Amino acid sequence: MKQNYFFILLCVFTLLTSCAGGDDSPIATENTTPAVAKTGKLTGKVMSQNGTKPIGGASVFTFDDKYKIYYTTSDAEGNFTLEAPVGNHTIHIQTGNGSNFRTEISATVKDNETLNLDVSQTKLNQVAKIAYVKGTYDKIEDIIQTLGYTATEINNSDLANLTTIAQYDIIFLNCGSRSSYTSNPALYTVIDANLATFVANGGSIYASDWDVAYLVGGTTNTNNCSLPGGFVPDSKLCSKNIGTSGMVAATVNNAGLTSALGFSTLNIDYDLSQWQKIINYDPNYWEVLVKETSSNDPLMIRSNHFTATGTTTTPIGTTTTFVTVCITLPGNIQISISVPQVLVPYLVALGATVGPCSGSSTSGYIYYTTFHNHASGNIGNAGVILQYVILNL
């Protein structure tokens, strides 16, 4: 009986000890809430190379020691405020995907303090080599120069030499430039093939008005669909030379462009008696950036979806150690930026992908405007749009 009594006491003691928990039971002795990262702020104003023009819509970003991105954009006046982690960092300023225009700044960020960057530090540098073909009606080179950047004049014979154009990152085709070689139509086929190779390997092109013929065929302009020549498939675009002179009310159709410009409507001066109207286009291939307000007809389009079978793999443009990647920000916002190659594996490990967020991974951009880049009168707000084109190719 005595033994049973002690046995019962032992069982009760064991049960109480088990319920109270032993040495192996977790004990919450401290706050496990993750520490809030210490940050400061960087402010500045993104300016063109010569310091005369504010640049809106520029990407401004840096990374912490775990490769988390801190990101913002400049407003229409070029101003930005970037929250950044405490410490010594490289601050990146870029337009487009950063492959053609970018600046890197070393800065020390202090906890809960604001560092104002001088405008001499925040000028957007030209990385790309730029060429243009002289036109009859346009002078995009003038707009390039007003920003403080440089471009080399080439001609249609140069376009017929792949080795020559492969050294450039961007080629501007001024309206009327195609007509300069109508006396030698044999060049058409060669130039079309070279431009296809150029864009398929990452080179970018801007063409205005009549020079849509470089894209879809024709000679000085296009008066019908599916003309011989060109390098963009006929199913993707058709433009006819049926526009009439006058002011056209237009609407900016892209949120990023609107933010960069600071306006969403404008009047565009079509100063020639005939200009190219876009009749048909593939909306999955082209993005409409500016449209006619009353009819919704596209006036400015772009694409980086170009692919072509049979084109050779050719190195295009400036040799660089930067790589374009796509990063997803909070809110499922995707951005295409260029980063030093050494960062790529770490960013990919965090979910980034190599290449731009949309389009073909190897395609450059094609921009086309039905309006001129250097009208005989005042081009007004269209001039600001064309500055955006230059910096975002």
Image (cartoon, rainbow, N blue to C red):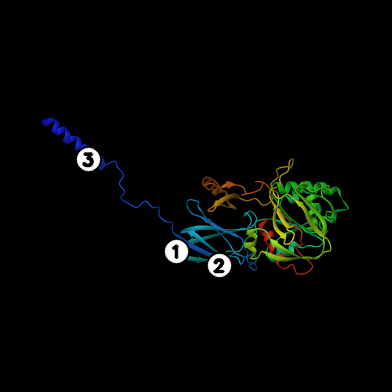
Q: Residue furthest right?
A: 183
**Residue 120 image label:** none
**Residue type (three-letter) at the residue carrying disc 2:** Asp
Local secondary structure at mark 2: loop
Residue found at x 55% / y 47% = 352
**Residue type (three-letter) at the residue carrying disc 1:** Asn
Q: Assign the C terminus to one quadrant of the image.
A: bottom right
Q: Which residue is mark 1?
A: 112
Estimate how packed mark 2 is, as few (under 14), some (14 to 19) or many (20 or more) residues with alpha carbons within 10 Å: few
Question: Position of 272 compared to 71: left or right?
Answer: right
**Residue type (three-letter) at the residue carrying disc 3:** Leu
Local secondary structure at mark 3: helix
Q: Which residue is mark 2?
A: 118
Tell me if I can see residue 343 in this picture: yes
Q: Is residue 8 above or below residue 228?
A: above
Instruction: Work out how far the residue at label 1 is from the one at label 3, CA to CA, in angstroms.
Output: 52 Å
Q: Is residue 146 above or below residue 3?
A: below
Between 209 and 246, the residue placed more toward the observer is 246
Estimate how packed mark 1 is, as few (under 14), some (14 to 19) or many (20 or more) residues with alpha carbons within 10 Å: few
Q: Quadrant of residue 256?
A: bottom right
**Residue 16 image label:** 3
Residue 10, x across and y down, in percent? 18, 35
Residue found at x 48% / y 61% = 108
Q: Nearer the N terminus, badge 2 or badge 3?
A: 3
Q: Assign the N terminus to one quadrant of the image.
A: top left
Tell me if I can see residue 22 in this picture: no
2 or 1: mark nearer the eye? 1
